[in-house]
Amino acid sequence: MPDPLSYIDRESERFREELFEFLRIPSISARSEHDADTRRAAEWLLTHLRNAGVDAALAETPRHPAVIARWTDAPHAPTVLVYGHYDVQPAEPLDEWSSAPFEPEVRDGRIRARGAADDKSQVFLQVKALEALLATRGTLPLNVTLVLEGEEEIGSPDLVPLIQARRHELAADHVVISDSMMFGPGQPSLIFAMRGLAYFELDAEIGSHDLHSGQYGGAVANPANALAAVIASMHDAVGHVAVPGFYDDVAPVDDTLRARFRALPFDDAAYQRSAGGAEPVGEAGYTTVERLWTRPTLDVNGLVSGYTGEGAKTVLPARARAKLSCRLVAGQDPARVGERLRAHVERVTPPGVRITVRQIQAARPWRSNTDNALYRAAGAALEQTFGVPPVLAAHGGTLPIAPEFEDVLNANVVVMGFALPGANMHAPDEWFPEAHVGLGMKAMVRLYEQLGGQAPS
Amino acid sequence: MPDPLSYIDRESERFREELFEFLRIPSISARSEHDADTRRAAEWLLTHLRNAGVDAALAETPRHPAVIARWTDAPHAPTVLVYGHYDVQPAEPLDEWSSAPFEPEVRDGRIRARGAADDKSQVFLQVKALEALLATRGTLPLNVTLVLEGEEEIGSPDLVPLIQARRHELAADHVVISDSMMFGPGQPSLIFAMRGLAYFELDAEIGSHDLHSGQYGGAVANPANALAAVIASMHDAVGHVAVPGFYDDVAPVDDTLRARFRALPFDDAAYQRSAGGAEPVGEAGYTTVERLWTRPTLDVNGLVSGYTGEGAKTVLPARARAKLSCRLVAGQDPARVGERLRAHVERVTPPGVRITVRQIQAARPWRSNTDNALYRAAGAALEQTFGVPPVLAAHGGTLPIAPEFEDVLNANVVVMGFALPGANMHAPDEWFPEAHVGLGMKAMVRLYEQLGGQAPS
C-alpha cells in the first residue's frame, strides 16, 4: 500500500481534472441568478467527500448551504476543524479577463479561473488530503471536521449562527482556515492576524430628479460635489484617516513584532507588478507590510452619479452614491467605526444635501496568540513540505470567521494557505499555482500526522 | 382676409397636431443610433417652411444638418435672423418619466415630451409665425432668415464654421435667439446675458486592473478617494470655486444692475419645487438670481468608479472618472479656465495616482448692450402680447451661438423665449405651456411688424 504522499503524486492528473470541474461551476454567492450554481458547487463537494470516505451533509441556511464533513474515529486524538469556502466573487469586468473566468486553463504553471485562488483550489486540496490519507492508511491520525461555506464573499451572514447552533458537534481543539496565500514563492506562511471590515453605502440627494446645470448650477447644492467633499474629509494630507475617533481603539503593535515585520524581505517591485503597476504609497510613517498588516484603511469601492455615458451631458445630478469600506485592525469594532463614520458624515455634510450612511457589512478583526501546539505542528508541516520554516505573518484581508471560531469553539486558530501574492483575487485573471495543489495536500497530511502524534509520512 | 393673430387662433388645433408630430421624432444629436431621426426632424422643418412659402434648404455639416430658411422680398426693411435648434437631449433616466418622452401629451395645460421646451415648440412657433403672416398678408414686413440647427445639445460644433462661411448670405441687423424661458408665468423676459460652458472629463488611474481591497487597501492609492479629494479641493467652505485664477477674468456687474437683479420678485419656493425639492443654496454673498445670472460654477455632472451594483464588493478600483463642467460668466474664456483647472489638478493630485483632464466642450459666455431697436421692438411686442413689459434678464444656461452671432454678423442679439421656469429641460418630464405656442407666434408677428416699421396687428 502506498503512502499518502506518493498517492498525491500519482493521482495528480485526475485531481487536476476534478479541480477544473469544480472551478467551472459559477458559484457566485452575491448574484441570485447563480443560486442554483452555488448549490451545485456544494453538492459537488458532498459527492467527493463521501467518495473519500468522510461523512458529509449540507447545512441549510436562508441563503447558501454550508458543507459539513466529519471523521471522528480517533477518540483519543485531538480534533481539527478546517474551514474554507466554495463561493466566489462576481467575475466583472469580464472584458479584462485573458480567458473565460469559468473555463479554467493552465498557463505558465498557473491555473487561471475565478475562484482558483479564492478559495476553490484550497477547499479542493483539503478534501483530497483526506482522500489521500483514507485511501492509503484507511484511517486518519486525528478527528477532522470540514466546514465549507457558500457565503464568504457576501460576508458570511449565516455562518456564525450556524457555528453557534452546532458548537457541540463542531467542538475542536484546533482550527485551520484554508483561505489565504503564502508570503511569497517558496515562502510559506502562518497567518495569525487579519483585518476586519466595515462596509458602507453613502447616498447623497438634493431632490427628486436630475436638473439642468445651466438653470440650477450654482443655485442648488451638487450631491456629487458634496459627496466628494465628504469623502475627501475622511483623510488628511499624509494618508491618516481623519474620521474623529477612528484610531481610538487600535491595539498597539509591540516593537519586537513591528521590527520583525519591517525586516521581512517584502518585494515592493513584485507587489507593484501584481497590482497592475499601482505604486506602493500610503499612510506616512509605515512600510507597505505594516500598512497592510497593522493599519486600518478607508477605501472607496464604488462611485456613481449623474451621466456616465459617452460625451457631455450638462446634468446636475439629483443623487450620488459611494460604496466605501474600512479594513480594521485588532481592537477596532465595525459597529463603533460605523457610528463614528456616521457622526463624521453628519458633521461635514454641506447645506442643501442629505447624506445617509448605511452599513451593509461588518466583520471583526482578528489577532491570535501563536504559542501553542497548532502553530508548532503547522510550522513543522510547512517546513517539511517547502524546505523552509514559514513566515509568521499577518494579512490585510478579512476572514470574518477567524475570531468567531476562536471565541465560540475556544480553539486555536491559524490561517494557512497556498495561493501566491498577485493572485488577482476579486479581480480579472485570478490564478493559483498548479504545483501548490499537491504541495498543499502534502502539507495538510503532515499537519494531521504531527497533531495526531504520529511520525511524519 | 383674416389678420395673422386671428389665423393663429383659428389654426391652433392643427398646429398642436403638427407640433406633436415634430415632438415624436427622437432627434437626439448625441446618439449616433438616432442620426436618421435627427435628419428626419430637419426634413420635417424643411417641408413645413416650404409649405408656408419660405425658401428653405439643408446646410450639411459633418454631423447633423442645419435648416436655413430665407424670405428676402423687403429690400428697404431690416433683416432679422432667428435661431433655434431641432435636436434634443437624451431622455435618460427613462424610468423617471411619467409619460413616454417621445409620445407627447397635454396634461394640466402642459405639453409633455423630450424637446417640448428645449427647443422644439419654440422652433415650431417661429416657423408657424411666418406661415401666419404669409397666409394672411401674402408678405412679411421685413426680411427674415431662420437658422435651425441640429447640434445644440452637443455643443454646436459645426455652427460657427457654418455662420462664418455663410456670413454674407446670413447678414442681419438683428438676431433673435428662440431657445429660452420667461422669468415666470405672465412675466415675459428679454435675456441679454448667458453663461458659457467648459466641460471636462477627469480620469484617475493607479494601474491596469481592479484590486482586492484587503490585499492592497492602504498600500496603494485609491483613485476614487483621490478624485474625490481633487474635486473637493475645487471649492472652499463657503461655495467659492477654489481653483486659483478662476475668477480673475470675471467682468464686474455694476451696482445698478445688481440692485435690479436683487429686486426681482424671484420666487425661491417655486424654484425649489421646480428643482424637485432641492434647496436653494450656493456661493456666500449672492442671491439665487445672482448666483444663476452673474456667477460662474463648477459642477460634477457624472461620477463612476469600481463596483456600483447591488451589495458589497471589496474592490479597490483601478480607475475613477468624473465629468465636470463650469458655467462661465462675461469676461471668462473656456480655454483659459481649462488651463487653470488642469494646472490645479496637477498641483493637488496625490502621490500614486495619475489624473488626466480632457476638455470635451467649450462655449463662451455672452453679455449684450440693450440700448437698441431690437430690444425696444421686442419689449413692445412682448408687452402687447402678455400685457406687461418684459423683465430684462440674464440666464444661467449656455447658448454658444449668442456671442458668435454678435461677433460674426455684427448684429444686435436678444434671447427671447416662451418656456416657463421648472420646464425640466435636460430632465425627465420636460414640458412647455400649451397656450404659449400661440402667444409665442403672436409675439413674433408683432416683433416683425415693429421692426419692419408697420402698425401692429
Image: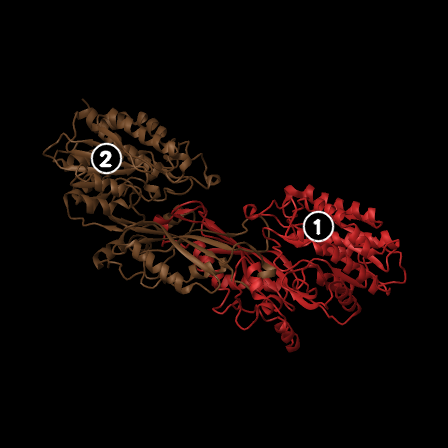
Chain colours: A red, B brown
Q: Is residue B134 above or below residue A238?
A: above
Q: Position of residue A223 (x, y in %)?
A: 45, 54
Q: Position of residue A230 (x, y in %)?
A: 48, 61
**Mark whose residue sits in front, 1 or 2:** 1
**Chain at numbered mark 2:** B
User: Image check: B148 left or right of B73?
Assistant: right
Q: Position of residue A234 (x, y in %)?
A: 51, 64
User: What residue appears at the point 33 percent right and 27 percent down from the top-left corner?
Assistant: B18
User: What residue appears at the point 17 percent right and 45 percent down from the top-left corner?
Assistant: B410
Considering the image in quadrants, where does the C terminus of chain B appear?
Answer: top left
- Which mark, residue A433? none
| Secondary structure found at label 2 | strand
Q: Nearer the viewer, residue A199 or B12?
A: A199
Q: Position of residue B356 (x, y in %)?
A: 41, 56
- Image quadrant where residue A118 sits: bottom right
Instruction: State the residue position of label 1.
Output: A86
Crowding at mark 1 (Cα within 10 Å: few <14, some 14-19, many 20+): many
Crowding at mark 2 (Cα within 10 Å: few <14, some 14-19, many 20+): many
**Cα–Cα gap, marks 1 and 2:** 68 Å
Which kind of residue does numbered mark 2 sit on? Leu
Q: Is residue B234 visible?
A: no
Q: Could you confirm whether marks 1 and 2 are on the same chain?
A: no
User: What residue appears at the point 35 percent right and 36 percent down from the top-left corner?
Assistant: B116
Which kind of residue does numbered mark 1 sit on? Tyr
Extreme-left residue of the structure: B76
Q: Nearer the viewer, residue B325 or B262?
A: B325
- Which mark, residue B146? 2
**Chain at numbered mark 1:** A
